[in-house]
Image: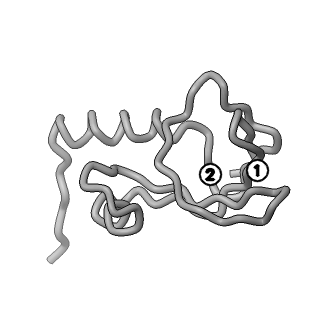
């Protein structure tokens, strides 16, 4: 027998908020902001996994990026803002 998962209105609202906070960042996207220029390696939307990766109790997502100039890799949970700019998008 198949299991059907029904999202509550609160779950759906949280999903939308998280999607807005992630913005256009998806695997392969290159973006920049005041901190540097980054390529997205992975987007983690499972809250428990994001909390484990970032060691933050309230994390809802984690984004693995690499600084394209220094090669430094890190995870971030920064919210997409008006100062962030996509430099290279990828086909979906």
Residue highlighted by disc 1: 90
> Crowding at label 2, few (<14), some or many (≥20) Cα neighbours within 10 Å?
some
Count all numbered tags in the image, as a single digit. Answer: 2
Query: Residue 76, image x and y in percent?
Result: 52, 53
Percent position of residue 52, x then y: 33, 68
The quadrant where residue 80 appears: top right
Q: Name, please, the residue furthest toward the bottom.
A: 1
At x 24% / y 55%, what residue is drawn?
57
Residue 44 - label: none
Q: Secondary structure at mark 1?
A: loop
Tag 2 secondary structure: loop
Front residue (pair 32, 13): 32
Name the residue rendered at 27%, 33% in the picture. Answer: 13
Q: Residue furthest right?
A: 69
The residue singled out by tag 2 in the image is 26
Colouring convention used in this rendered image of the protein: one colour
- Residue 87 x, y percent position in the rendering: 81, 39
Residue at the location (61% across, 39% down)? 24
In the depicted structure, whether residue 66 falls above or below residue 34: below
Verify CB contact (< 8 Å) between mark 2 and mark 1. yes
Q: Residues within 10 Å of mark 1 (few under 14, many from 20)?
A: few
Which mark sits nearer the N-terminus, 2 or 1?
A: 2
Q: As drawn, is 36 to the left or to the right of 76? A: right
Is residue 81 found left or right of 7 in the rendered image? right
Kindly indicate the quadrant of the structure image that contains residue 32: top right
| Residue farthest top in this picture | 82
Q: Nearer the viewer, residue 10 or 87?
A: 87
Q: Quadrant of the N terminus?
A: bottom left
Q: What's the CA distance linking mark 2 and mark 1?
A: 8 Å
Above or below 18: residue 83: above
Instruction: Tell me what residue is drawn at x 34 percent, y 67 percent.
Output: 49
């Amino acid at each position: 027998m198949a299991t059907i998962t029904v999202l509550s209105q609160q779950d759906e609202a949280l999903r939308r908020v998280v999607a807005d906070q992630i913005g256009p960042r998806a695997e392969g996207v290159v973006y920049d902001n005041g901190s540097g220029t980054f390529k997205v390696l992975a987007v983690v939307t499972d809250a428990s996994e994001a909390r484990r990766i970032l060691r933050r109790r309230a994390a809802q997502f984690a984004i693995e990026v690499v600084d394209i100039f220094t090669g430094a890799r890190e995870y971030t949970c920064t919210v997409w803002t008006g100062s962030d700019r996509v430099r290279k998008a990828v086909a979906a």
